[in-house]
Amino acid sequence: MLIENLSGAFSEVFSLGNLMLMFLGVSAGLIAGSIPGFTITMAVVLTLPFTFGLSAVEGLATMIGVFVGGLSGGLMSGMLTGIPGTPSSVATTFDGFPMARGGRPGLALGIGIWSSFFGGILSACLLVALAPQLARIGLEFGPWDYFALVLFALTITASLSGENLVKGVIAGLLGLLVATIGEDEVNGVARFDFGVDALRQGFAFLPVLVGLFAFSQLLSDVRDVAAARRPLMEKSAQAVRVEHLKAVRQIFRHWAQLVRSALIGTFTGILPAAGGSISNILAYDQAKKASRNPEAFGSGTPEGIIAPESSNNATAGGALITMMALGIPGDVVTAVMLGALLIHNVQPSPTFISDNPQLAYAIFVAFFLAHFIMIAMQAVCLRAFLLVVRVPMYTLASVILLYCAIGVFALNNVTFDIWTLFVFGVLGYVLKTLGFPLPPMILGVVLGHVAELNLSRALAISDDISLFVTRPWALFFLVISLFSAVFPWYQARRHEARWTLFYFPAFCAAIVLPLFLMEGVVRPILAGALLLIAAFTLWRHQQAGWQLPPRGSGAEVSQLRET
Amino acid sequence: MQTRINRDSVSAVFLLLFCGVFIAASFEIETTNYGTLQSSVWPQIILGALSLFSLLLLTQALRRPPAPGEGGGLGAWLRRYRNPLICYALFLAFLVSLPVLGMLLGGILFVLVMLTILGGGKLAQLPLHLAIAVVSVGAMWAIFTYALGVFLPGGIILNLQ
């Protein structure tokens, strides 16, 4: 069965047409990722309209190409000019730029490229190994559990996306509300159409997404009149010859760093909302703590490049695990991919891998392949990047705005979709300007139907609402939702308030109950271990006289994020 | 006494009004004699939570003074958001004129005007902007029409299909 699925996936992914699309996708991602202010999400969102006419495999393979290319593209500008192309390559700049400026730009680029490659490949292996296992767990979920999982995804996105949890939750609720407009899936009744015929069908996902994300982002990029007229990058950079062999040798010398960072990246990616922008800094911080020469960090040490670059590419694999196994997007990019699957009438859910094995395995293969293409295309795209960054932002924004209009029109061939794009473009910009994070809103739009459908199914099976807190998985997700909602306060006050010392032990102790209620042997054993960890942590705090951690510990991560 | 009206408090009041309108509209949703979950229940749950969090935002906002840089009058606001406002106005004009001009002509005009206004309105740059508009929109139009088989709006003037 596995061989059959894999060979089917190989023949689709390695077809000439698909290979060409992937080369294009990776190249576009590399260039887009290298342009400061042009995020990977925007590149993936803008790729979506081109995929309507393609098969599901071709469409997703192209988007995976853009995703992988974008994650690796950010290092080019970061190393050559000191300005990271994407938030996921911020930490790469700390050592990549000094190394390049110190006369070794070829080696710096080489280490970055190959770390991205190895990090991505390691996470691809984890994707293949973990996604089917996690999907098997997902099959245990009833509608109560799935509803609680959606709540968890929204809560953690709201708490991690912005400084203000209340604004994050409001954004998520607005997304859920947008998803209710139009005919409801359960009873087929029109809602909030206000007498407008076009609203009866509801808003198509793509125009909402492009409007909220790309349209509003472009307008933010051209808001400053003077900056919009300047070239994308004023600092000059020159094409360099990448030192592949030396770079690979350096990486093998620090293989433990690579594996640790790739694991950090993958597991950060599995968490909804935690993407490459968090993982690269987390990995850099951990690499510095584990290094024998922490004082060398910041001056151009290879370890300082290996850690962030391997972790940010590994994040993609982690995000794909959550998307494929549970049908929940790990970040905004995978939310777009979920949208692409819906366009091709594929419903993401825990049964996705078993229902669509060929497509699932094609995603695995495409993810592997995209990393090889990335290596091949990096040198070519480096030259293209040096040309593109001479263009002023207003030129790019004008052309892309029109492209957005054409792209969303192509979905259903109706002008109403361009109106939707316009309205959500205004809404996205206003919300962003007022400090409301957009990722929770996008997730709300994507997951709104899933939440309502599962709530309805749960009530159809039983009118006992206590099942939402008595079923182990539902309780598990509700508990971690609660703790993720409190997390911003914990993070802000962990050096000041004594109650923060109880946060981690309380979290461990709280998830023990649902784990004990679960079937099997492994999970109750895990629950016992967590209980011991909670007790041990409390004992250590008590031994230390309930002292709060000093400002230096862990604060470096938040400082790095601010940088 | 320092005024407590700030950006967040205005947003919260607006959100509460928005919730009011939608809650009223949710009572207009048809009630069916089938299905376990009425179509209005889920939106009402969301709106209830949204109202609650909007109230929380209002309370939060009223407890903090306006951030530096907030306010400054209409003139300053218009100056600050000049480019986005121009973009929206031009996009709206493009959208309204779409049935007449079509995607190709309307698109070229939209990109050209956008480039000219955002680029500083220098006449010397006009040929370059025109070239960018024609080439980029023409290429996109050709790709979608011929390669992807999408029938973009032709418009009354050119009537392209």
Image: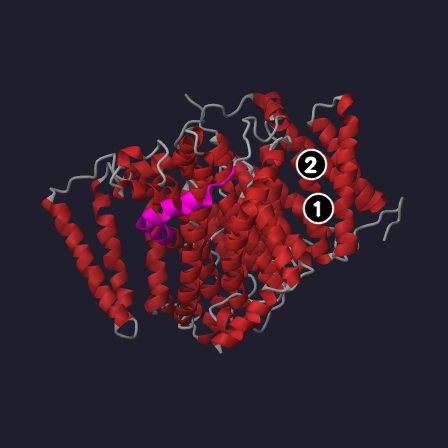
> How far from the left and from the top, in percent, is residue A86?
50, 40
Crowding around mark 2 (Cα neighbors within 10 Å: few <14, some 14 to 19, many 20+) is many
Residue under mark 2: which chain is it in?
A
Residue appearing at x 37%, y 35% in the figure: A560
What kind of residue is marked 2? Ser
Where residue A554 appears, x then y in whole percent?
A: 28, 40
Residue nearest the observer in this picture, A167 or A67: A67
Residue A238 screen position, x and y as percent = 55, 31
Magenta-drawn stretch contains A261: yes
Q: Which mark is residue A398?
A: 2
Residue position for label 1: A405
Instruction: Give amino acid for label 1.
Output: Ala
Residue appearing at x 67%, y 54% in the figure: A50
Q: Would residue A313 be visible to someone looking at this image?
A: yes
Question: Magenta residues: mostly which secondary structure?
Answer: helix
Q: Quadrant of residue A534?
A: bottom left
In this picture, which residue range is highlighted in magenta? Answer: A241-263
